[in-house]
Amino acid sequence: MRALLAGLLLLWLALPAARAQGHGGEVSELQLQRSPEGLYLSAALQLELPELVRDALLKGISIHFTTEAEVLRERWYWSDKVMAHATRYLRLSYQPLTRRWRLMQSPVPFAATGLGVSLGQNFDELSDALAAIQRVSRWKIAEPGVLDDDSDYTVRFEFRLDLSQLPRPLQIGAVGGSSWNVALSRSVRLPAQEGAR
């Protein structure tokens, strides 16, 4: 009986962790390029929007995504040191009157006033807007001089749906709901440059 109770307790504790891992696709390709101007990241995502997210979009609710990249240097005596951190914010919305999709991209969080520096694109189809979201091309994630040529680094990449930007009633319903949990991540090793050691 104790073994059964212990097993059920472990299963109950494991459920939130399983939900937290998320779903929605995968990072199918991740490339890094060092240059004198800094470190650039390119990625290809295989993104599948859950049906609840698609329904919210069609009802005129903007959906926000966050893309983050961290460059870490391993330290045996302490936790890894963050050498560089970059974040990119995306907002996807549907305009029912024009029947067009709008994708906004910004290096800073979107303000409630709508003001700020951002790049906007319009699309006729959701599939075209998603194709633009799924491509990250030559995104500068580290400035020149931040990384040593003779050190190895780990780059962590993460793409997720930002639930904190949803309207309050949807936030309450989305907490803990796996249908809203879109999170893709991948880590790659950035080796030292040849000839630097």
Image: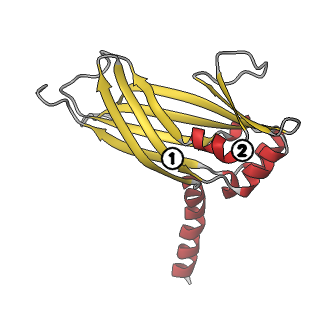
Q: Earlier in the sequence, mark 1 or mark 2?
A: 1
Where residue 117 appears, x then y in whole percent? Answer: 64, 16
Height in image: 163 above or below 50? Answer: above
Height in image: 122 above or below 170? Answer: above
Q: Which residue is mark 1?
A: 45
Where residue 79 appears, x then y in whole percent? Answer: 34, 35
Report the disc number at residue 57: none
User: For the point 72% across and 21% down, which residue is it?
Assistant: 111
Q: Amino acid at mark 2?
A: Glu
Q: Secondary structure at mark 1?
A: strand
User: For the point 35% across and 20% down, which residue is it?
Assistant: 38
Q: Quadrant of residue 169?
A: top right
The local crowd at label 1, few if under 14, some if 14 to 19, many if 20 or more residues have their Cα within 10 Å, is many
User: For the point 59% across and 54% down, which residue is it?
Assistant: 24
Q: Give the left or right position of residue 107, taking residue 169 as reference.
A: left
Report the disc number at residue 125: 2
Q: Looking at the image, which is closer to me, 40 or 127? A: 127
On the rendered image, what quadrant is the C terminus found in?
top left
Q: Amino acid at mark 1?
A: Leu
Q: Give the left or right position of residue 184, taking residue 55 as reference.
A: left
